[in-house]
Image (cartoon, helix red, strand yellow):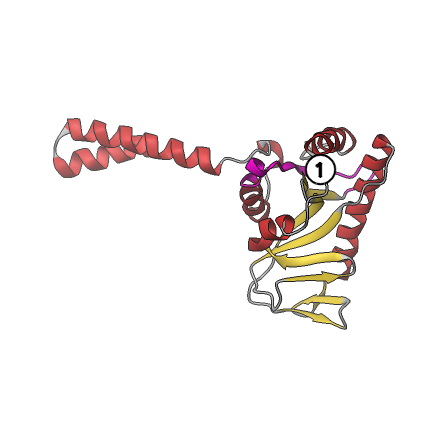
């Protein structure tokens, strides 16, 4: 449709059908390139939210540095989901992407209470920590070793008055900092360990399919 509309517009404006065909071809090429760059690796039946897509695009850029990612993985026996599980040279991370109303301020009280406007986010923090803990137990049981997964909330929308803040054992930061948050740590996993953990995580954490 984009190609056809592009061809019609160019052809009508310039009164030359050959230019119209050229415009249609160029429009089709441009559309193809755009779709290739913005395509999600998450199947359409569990299409991610806008926040998840933004995080996913950032994580794609880490692949060349040896990081592997699983998206929308369920915690068996629950309704919980890890939006992005990242395994790479600096460790293992559970990233939950959140799109919050930018009109409401984000604040912390006593280093333990996270608020978005008047709303306490304690349940969300506890959920993120629990998801990472459960995933670590499942992967560790399969591998026969202790596995630590760092939980986080990547927030899009409102600005945060900090760079990275640990609240109730969960790292909280603006979504644009995802890559820096992951890569700032020292190397702790070898390439073979990364692949082994990635394969096991894919087995014990099934993809979250949409109902129906």
The local crowd at label 1, few if under 14, some if 14 to 19, many if 20 or more residues have their Cα within 10 Å, is many
Q: Is residue 1 visible?
A: no
Residue shown at the point (70%, 30%) measured from the top left: 195
> Residue 164 in the image: x percent, y percent?
65, 61
- Residues 203 and 101: in front is 203
Q: Quadrant of residue 138?
A: top right
Total labels drawn: 1
Residue 86 placement: quadrant: top right
Please give the range of residues in magenta: 60-79
**Left or right for 18, reference 54:** left
For this rendering, which residue is in front, 6 or 150?
150
From the viewer's perspective, tell me whether residue 152 is left or right of residue 147: left
For label 1, the SS is strand
Q: Looking at the picture, how far across and down is residue 193, in whole percent?
A: 73, 33
63 magenta-colored = yes
**Residue 105 left/right relative to 108:** left
Image coordinates for residue 31, horizontal then vertical, percent: 37, 34
- Residue 69 lies in what quarter of the image? top right
Residue 64 in the magenta stretch? The answer is yes
Q: Quadrant of the N terminus?
A: top left
Quadrant including the C terminus: top right
Which residue occupies 79% across, 45% down?
Answer: 148
Q: Residue furthest bottom?
A: 110
Residue 128 appearing in the image: yes
* 35 lies above or below 105: above
Q: Residue furthest left?
A: 15
Residue 38, given in percent of the width and then of the height, sits at 47, 38
Q: Which residue is mark 1?
A: 73
At a point 56% along the width and 65% down the height, the residue shown is: 159
């Amino acid at each position: 449709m984009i190609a056809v509309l592009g061809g019609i517009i160019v052809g009508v404006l310039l009164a030359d059908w050959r230019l119209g065909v050229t415009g249609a071809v160029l429009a089709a090429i441009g559309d193809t390139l755009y779709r290739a760059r913005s395509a999600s690796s998450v199947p359409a039946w569990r299409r991610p939210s806008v926040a998840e897509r933004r995080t996913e695009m950032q994580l794609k850029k880490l692949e060349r540095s040896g990081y592997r990612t699983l998206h929308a993985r369920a915690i068996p026996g629950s309704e919980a989901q890890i939006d992005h599980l990242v395994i790479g040279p600096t460790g293992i991370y559970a990233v939950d992407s959140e799109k919050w109303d930018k009109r409401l301020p984000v604040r912390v009280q006593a280093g333990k209470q996270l608020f978005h406007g008047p709303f306490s986010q304690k349940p969300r923090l506890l959920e993120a920590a629990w998801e990472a803990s459960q995933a670590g137990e499942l992967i560790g049981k399969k591998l026969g070793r202790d596995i630590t997964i760092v939980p986080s909330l990547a927030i899009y929308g409102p600005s945060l008055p900090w760079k990275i803040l640990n609240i109730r054992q969960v790292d909280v930061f603006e979504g644009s900092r995802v890559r820096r948050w992951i890569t700032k740590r020292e190397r702790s996993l070898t390439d073979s360990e990364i692949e082994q953990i990635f394969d096991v995580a894919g087995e014990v954490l099934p993809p979250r399919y949409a109902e129906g």
